[in-house]
Amino acid sequence: MPNLAFEDARIALAGATLDVSCRLVNRSTAAWSGTDGWAAGYHLFDDPTGVLVVDGERLALNLQPGESSEFALHVATPPEPGEYSIYISAMRENEAWFYERGWTFLLIEFVVGDDGVPVLRNWRPATIRSIRAKRLARSFGRAFTMPFTSVWRNRNLVRTMVRRDVMGRYTGSFGGAFWAVLNPLLLMMTYFFVFGIVMETKFKNDPSKTGFALYFLAGMLPWLPFSEAVGRAPFVLLEHRNFIKKLVFPVETLPVNLVVSGLVTEFFGLILFLLALFCIRGSVPVTALYVPLVLIPQVLLTAGLAWFLAALGAFARDLGQIIGYMLTVLMFLTPIFYPEEQLPKFAAGVIRANPVYVLVHAYRAVLLESHAPDWRALGWLMLAAMALFVLGHAWFHKLRKSFADLI
């Protein structure tokens, strides 16, 4: 049985003032006296964040057990747009607001529009436990929707920033944006010379040198955009510190820009790969149409890691150097330059848990071996990538308020 009951509640808006009237009933076994500090009052919260905005007035309570009295308040609504909630509760000076101890309180929810006009949503008796359960459910839902809505809402900005990033890296050079393709191409030619020509590595499905080149290049297609975004993520906030310090800027788009920039490079690389594949084998398998499906977990995985590392990089400046080393190790632990059959048995299971290996294996399956990817492995990767995508964004969103002070 509640200690406090609200009967005949009447809530109305008069301009920017919220008029509240109801009958308060003492359902406890103790007498409430205003001289002992008993009162009824209100707290006004910013609803999405739970931040206390107004510690409102108190009206003394003088009620014996079972007695009731009329209660009326006039609350000025905030002028700032947003979602708000009011908790009307019993309290005792220098002891507690009793809604925090689980007592029933009157909850009033309203929203202030961009024009500053408040709109009443609803009101009801509630408990702090029910509010926390509602916030937990809402936070859980927002965690899954916010990463997608944020990217979609700022898609034009992402497109502009990616174009600026790709073109800006090569401004003033003779090759211009062509270096976006030439740089990874020269890198891959170097690896091909070392592993394909000098070490004469061969893949069993196609032991020729052209076969090695195709298998090697197919493995590099997912690796290059992944390593580019992850390797640059710890530095991205420092690179754009002026945006963060001086502008109202959707900073969560900065790691996304790196992911999309890597996809632009991969797109041109994929076009060149398909042309080479057609010239060498005379055809392109129809299973190449599976590539967009393989890209989904690849993008989610890369974006999640980029958000996580970008936020962490604002606190740990050495992270970029550590990630560069770890990417080098990961590249050689992934069967890109050599067939997985060369792995010792004790290492094969561990390597196959490598998410980049799953992507490499999928690319080779759909582009070179004319069959669908391993759906089971890709499904597990999809679940892990989705979890990392959501958690990475939540981590970034949680820490974003401190970025301006750190960089």
Image: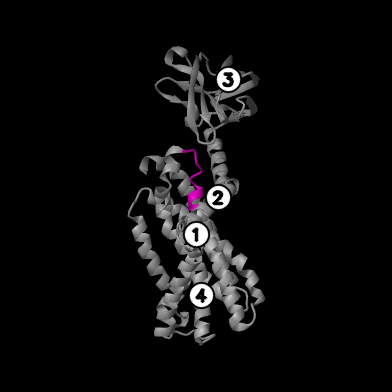
Where in the figure is residue 64, as x and y percent of width and height?
52, 15
Q: Badge 3 is on which residue?
A: 25
> Which element type, helix, strand or loop, lies under badge 1?
helix
Q: Which residue is nearer to you in this view: 35 or 271?
A: 271
**Contact (CB < 8 A) between labels 3 and 1?**
no
Residue type, numbered disc 3: Val
Marks 2 and 1 in Cβ contact (< 8 Å) = no
Q: CA distance from mark 3 to mark 2?
A: 61 Å
Q: Quadrant of the C terminus?
A: top left
Q: Decide: marks 4, 1 in contact (CB < 8 A)?
A: no
Range of the magenta residues?
247-255
Q: Residue at x 52, y 54 (%)?
A: 162
Q: Earlier in the sequence, mark 3 or mark 1?
A: 3
Sequence-first disc among 4 and 1: 4
Dot 1 alpha-carbon crowd within 10 angstroms: few under 14, some 14 to 19, many 20 or more: many
Q: Residue at x 53, y 83 (%)?
A: 211
Query: Which residue is denoted by mark 4 in the rendering?
Result: 217
Which numbered marker is on residue 160?
2
Check disc 1 and give the amino acid type.
Thr
Q: Nearer the viewer, mark 4 or mark 1?
A: 4
User: Which residue occupies the extreme left position in the image?
Assistant: 318
Q: Nearer the viewer, mark 2 or mark 1?
A: 2
Q: Label 1 belongs to which residue? A: 302
